[in-house]
Amino acid sequence: MVAPTGTFQAALRLFENGQVAEAQRRLTEFVLIEPQNAEAWNLLGVIEFQKSNFADAVKLFRKAVQINERSAKYLTNLGSAWNGQDDTREATECFERAIESDPRCVEARTYLGILHLQQGRLDEAQAALQAALIDAPKSALARLNLGNLFREQGQFDQAAEQYEFSLSTDPDYAEALLNLGVVRSEQGRFADAVPHLRRAAKLRPRAAAIHLDLAAALRETGDHAGAVQSYQRALSFQASSFDGWMGLGQSNVDLERWGDAISSFQKAISLQPSSAEAHQQLGKALQSSGQAEEAVRHFAVAKMLAPKSPA
């Protein structure tokens, strides 16, 4: 049986145009006809990888590697799929094989560097990321993770420099904006942090963690109303965030909105009943609102939970 001309290219165009399900259907039929087409197996692996079906992705990328075991691209993709399954040994082996096949494979060096960073092997991570940047100095991903490495080492200025490099290549890189904002907050430069965190929140509006970081920075700058809004946005996406309810309560305290503060601290306590800090803050809010008897009860609970804490 002869494969129709252009079948793979047609499937590739469908994939590139966002018609992933139809591309997958055609590719599945195509590899039955041309089982030695490594690119088809690889693309099927990419589709499963993008759906976070890492076990299936491993099987498909392995098909591609079996056909062309020297392909740095296929080995890198296979390593990424293994990493998605938290199999760091297999992932490391694939990335190293990819680099052996193509010493200038930026993706393999970058992913190997990220893997080492996740494992706390900072010297090896730095060597891999810097090697990647020799061949691709504008790699936003490599810059981002080199920044993460410097941040891990407490070198905040160097970290910020790498995040800024990353943003010079991709101004809409939400992860770099977030990390730059967080680093500035860690340096106590909250006014500098806010614009980066605002931009990150705009790019990823449903990311609760970004709204929480923005809210904390806004509160530090004295923008308590803005902090309340950001905490509320975060909680609209992650209502189970203890830190979110505590931050919202504290921001409402800053605004002397005692009723809202009490409600927020009560929600925090419902999530973590054993938090002495939550009971203490609720007690203070109740006291300020004139509910002295109820305040005393929560102060007593806080003291019981943390007897050595100051009253």
Image (cartoon, rainbow, N blue to C red):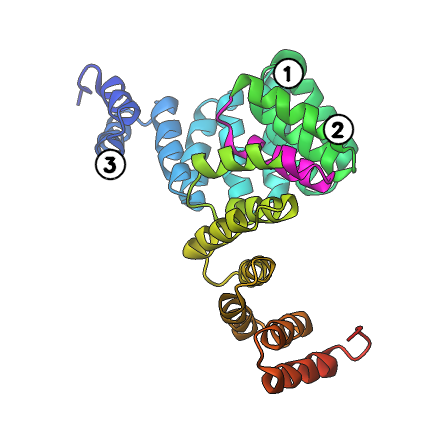
Is residue 119 inside the magenta stretch? no
State the image coordinates of residue 40 (x, y, percent, origin top left).
Answer: 34, 26
Crowd rating for badge 3 (residues with CA inside 10 Å; few <14, some 14–19, many 20+): few
Visible residue check, residue 239: yes
* Inter-mark Cα distance, 3 to 2: 45 Å
Q: Is 26 rendered above or below residue 83?
A: above
Q: Is 58 rendered above or below residue 208?
A: above
Tell me if 153 is positioned left or right of 115 in this view.
right
- Residue 157, picture quadrant: top right
Q: Name the element at disc 3.
A: helix
Q: Earlier in the sequence, mark 2 or mark 1?
A: 1
- Residue drawn at (44%, 39%), measured in percent from left and top? 204
Q: What is the three-letter code of the residue carrying label 1?
A: Pro
Crowd rating for badge 1 (residues with CA inside 10 Å; few <14, some 14–19, many 20+): some
Crowd rating for badge 2 (residues with CA inside 10 Å; few <14, some 14–19, many 20+): some
Count of numbered circles on the image = 3
- Give the number of the mark in front: 2 or 1: 2
Q: What is the three-letter code of the residue carrying label 3?
A: Ala
Pointer 2 residue: 157
Is residue 187 inside the magenta stretch? yes
- Residue drawn at (39%, 34%), measured in percent from left and top? 45
Pointer 3 residue: 21
Tell me the chief SS of the magenta region: helix
Pointer 1 residue: 103
Q: Which residues are magenta?
A: 171-192
Q: What is the three-letter code of the residue carrying label 2?
A: Asp
- Residue drawn at (58%, 37%), measured in percent from left and top? 194
